[in-house]
Image (cartoon, rainbow, N blue to C red):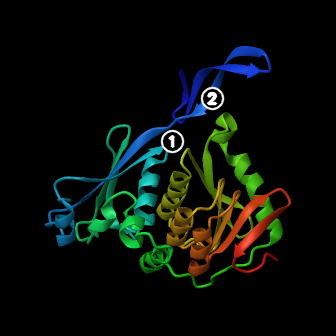
Amino acid sequence: MRTITKDILEVPIKRITGEQSVELTDSVSVEEPLEIRISLGGDLAPSSAVEKAGCEVSQSKSIAVTMRTPGADQELAVGFLYTEGIISSVTQIAEIKKSGCNVVDVVLNSEMEIDPALLDRHSFIASSCGVCGKKCIEAVSARRTYTPSAPFPSIATEVVLSLPDKLREAQKAFGCTGGIHASGLFDMSGNLVMLREDVGRHNALDKLIGASANSGLLPLEKHIILVSGRASFELVQKAAHAGCTALAAVGAPSSLAVELAQASGMTLMGFVRGAGFNIYTGADAS
């Protein structure tokens, strides 16, 4: 195997076509674990919530290990912390740094109070929702930093239809491997603002939201997010946390994703491909 870039690897393959086989090489997307750790900065004693969670000032707490494509790791960490409700602003981060190849340490401001229930992976769902979809939606609404001032925006049909081609054209890694997800941020006129790729669709969106937070773009009330796969509950949840009111997906949404989008004031579109798309919640496309 040969490394082409930090996110693309060249591997030997045997290509079968009918009864013929040929020895070739193929480019694949790199997938490696990333551990996200948090700690409190300064000399103040930890809050009671942190003490209960076993997170001390002098040591970091591992809160997630995710399989991701290397690159934009700090943005991924910021986006993850934001969409999991652990932080509500990048100003709550005192320092963020890479520790080795696959670890990101995030030092939070010492005065922060941290809910210990949020310090376990997927705890946003597990701790708040149990097995009830209605409680999941209520939990998202309770923890959202932004409430849309103009919910369910209407977006021109030609703008929506133009998004997949613009996303695909900007996907450098997908062009090489054909095996990576993307999340794109567009303005309401359909201009691409930024794009992030990752083998994990949730990671791609976390990277995008982290980059948006670092750039001071939150809330994303005047933007459209396009995801390259389906629209799951978790993707709608992450978009809602970022203040997004327009989410489009190349694939289909789930039932709970539709319910959450409706409750969040979000225009949700699916099967955005070719000459058409479906509107599941929000104003009709103009």
Residue 12 in sight here:
yes
- Front in this rendered view, residue 60 or 279: 279
Quadrant placement of the C terminus: bottom right
Amino acid tagged 1: Thr
Q: Is residue 163 above or below residue 168?
A: below
221 left or right, relative to 131: right
227 left or right, relative to 285: left
Mark number for residue 81? none
Residue 79, x across and y down, in percent: 46, 59
Label whose residue precedes the other's in the sequence (1 or 2)? 2
Seen at 45% across and 65% down, the residue is: 83
Seen at 76% across and 68% down, the residue is: 278
Mark 2 residue crowding within 10 angstroms, few (<14) / some (14–19) / many (20+): many
Residue 241, x across and y down, in percent: 49, 71
Q: Quadrant of residue 87?
A: bottom left
Q: Residue furthest right?
A: 275
Seen at 23% across and 66% down, the residue is: 110
Mark number for residue 69? 1
- Front in this rendered view, residue 257 or 240: 257
Q: Secondary structure at mark 2?
A: strand
Q: CA distance from mark 1 to mark 2?
A: 14 Å
Residue 90 in sight here:
no
Q: Are marks 1 and 2 in contact (CB under 8 Å)?
A: no
Amino acid tagged 2: Ser
Residue 104, x across and y down, in percent: 35, 48
131 left or right, relative to 230: left
Which residue is the site of mark 2? 27
Residue 17, x across and y down, in percent: 78, 21
Q: Secondary structure at mark 1?
A: loop
Mark 1 residue crowding within 10 angstroms, few (<14) / some (14–19) / many (20+): many
Seen at 31% across and 61% down, the residue is: 119
